[in-house]
Amino acid sequence: MTAKTRLFVDQPLAEGNCVSVSQAQAHYLFGVMRLAVGGAVSLFNGKDGEWRCEILEAGKRKGVLRCTVQTKPLQMPPDLWLCFAPIKKTRTDFIVEKATEMGASKICPVQTEFTNSERIKQERLQAHAVEAAEQCGGTYVPEVIALSKLSTMLDHWPEERQIMFCDETELGVASSLASASRGPWAILIGPEGGFSPAERKRLHSMPEAHVVSLGPRILRADTAAVAAMTIWQAALGDWV
Amino acid sequence: MTAKTRLFVDQPLAEGNCVSVSQAQAHYLFGVMRLAVGGAVSLFNGKDGEWRCEILEAGKRKGVLRCTVQTKPLQMPPDLWLCFAPIKKTRTDFIVEKATEMGASKICPVQTEFTNSERIKQERLQAHAVEAAEQCGGTYVPEVIALSKLSTMLDHWPEERQIMFCDETELGVASSLASASRGPWAILIGPEGGFSPAERKRLHSMPEAHVVSLGPRILRADTAAVAAMTIWQAALGDWV
């Protein structure tokens, strides 16, 4: 059974394996959560599923745990990239959190013509993805890749990967995914100001692109990300 | 055309009507946004649609605007209540914001057996709904009603209102709404700890209730609210 406390570690997990936790994790486990030797913690590493582990050593700055039993196999999300234009800090953090909960396999920040932010804190965003996976019971952590320009990304777009492109200016095509095929996909969410006319034209001309409407109200980017992933997961993903 | 700045006011809007803005709005319009006499602002009041208004007076603490032309009719959302168990402050604020963007007609905080919070700041949440409506281009602001106990609410449940009940313990019924009928609906989102066994039993026994799964990962309450409203809007609401 999954222990109440779940942590991500970057070490191999298998029966009998000993795992040392970081200083921050030791503080959390033994200081904040007050766990002690003999207590149970669930660990996952994004590769070996989830393991129930027993605490062997509980120090102020370090700790050692031993894997006892696998409580979940690795559950990969569908092959779905979430591509979005980074916005304000808190909203960007939320998008990464939501993408992890909703089952994106990769998180791709893209710079569009109307994107203000020219940099992202990739490590910080990756840490948010880890935390969200710890929270949501997932056994997989999506990679947050470096910021790239939308135009550059589209120049090298893999032709087998279909795109669900959420265009505010389109209406009433929410159901167009019903006839789309499974396989590698990406969801593309624009910035608050929408896509530029040139970007929209290019996307509309791509055979990989499926235009989807997210209703008659204008959604914030973080809301749009959750709504788009819901539509996709319910039509083509692992919610079906 | 909608002016760049949109504000909610609690006064009647009609051609030629003069509207006075609050001290906070005057500060925002003339101090922060630097608008001046002759400038344009869009106003809505949740009843009369959206009006383009001209600034007649721009003071430090007050201002007067005159309605020139209606730029949007009142667009009511579907008759959908969002019922949720209030959680931490920021997440509760987010749920109210998301419910407004996603088109809920009424926001109903409910206290469940596993809900920690015993009070909500109703006025503060209502202000969040207003701000979200200003942002998302809506012409309607959902009412945030007072916190009530789930058991009490269900005791007086109107039998014509169907319930979409998101139960974490159910799997693979995301499509069960496809055969449901339109009309008055409510979405019910549980607290982080889920519903109690007694609550689940009661909900499952109600003929109004439709159980819906939100995928294999555990979603935070704010994510679940957006996902559930997306499923509903795409199946039975105004996204169709």
Image (cartoon, coloured by chain):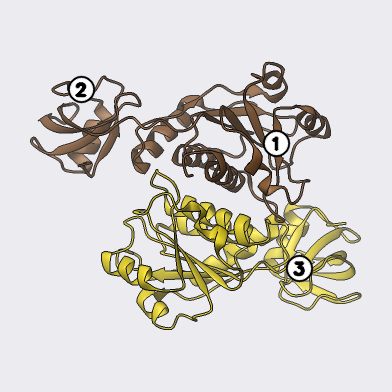
Chain colours: A brown, B yellow
Disc 1 is placed on an element classified as strand
**Nearer to us in this view, A189 or B238:** B238
Q: Say which residue appears at 56% left-offset and 27% top-offset.
A: A184
Eyeballing the image, is A32 above or below A43? below
Eyeballing the image, is B57 above or below A53? below
Q: Position of residue B67 (x, y in %)?
A: 87, 70
Quadrant where the C terminus of chain B sits is bottom right
Output the chain of dot 2. Answer: A
**Total numbered labels:** 3
First in residue order: circle 1 vs circle 2: 2
Does residue A117 show up?
no
**Nearer to us in this view, B165 or B55:** B165
Residue under label 3, please give it.
Answer: B44
Give amino acid for label 2.
Answer: Ala
Q: Tell me, for residue A14, which label it has, or none.
A: 2
Eyeballing the image, is B202 above or below A108? below
Residue A8 falls left or right of residue B225: left
Disc 3 is placed on an element classified as strand
Output the chain of dot 1. Answer: A
Residue A198 falls left or right of residue A98: right
Label 2: how many Cα within 10 Å (few below 14, some 14–19, many 20+): some
Disc 2 is placed on an element classified as loop
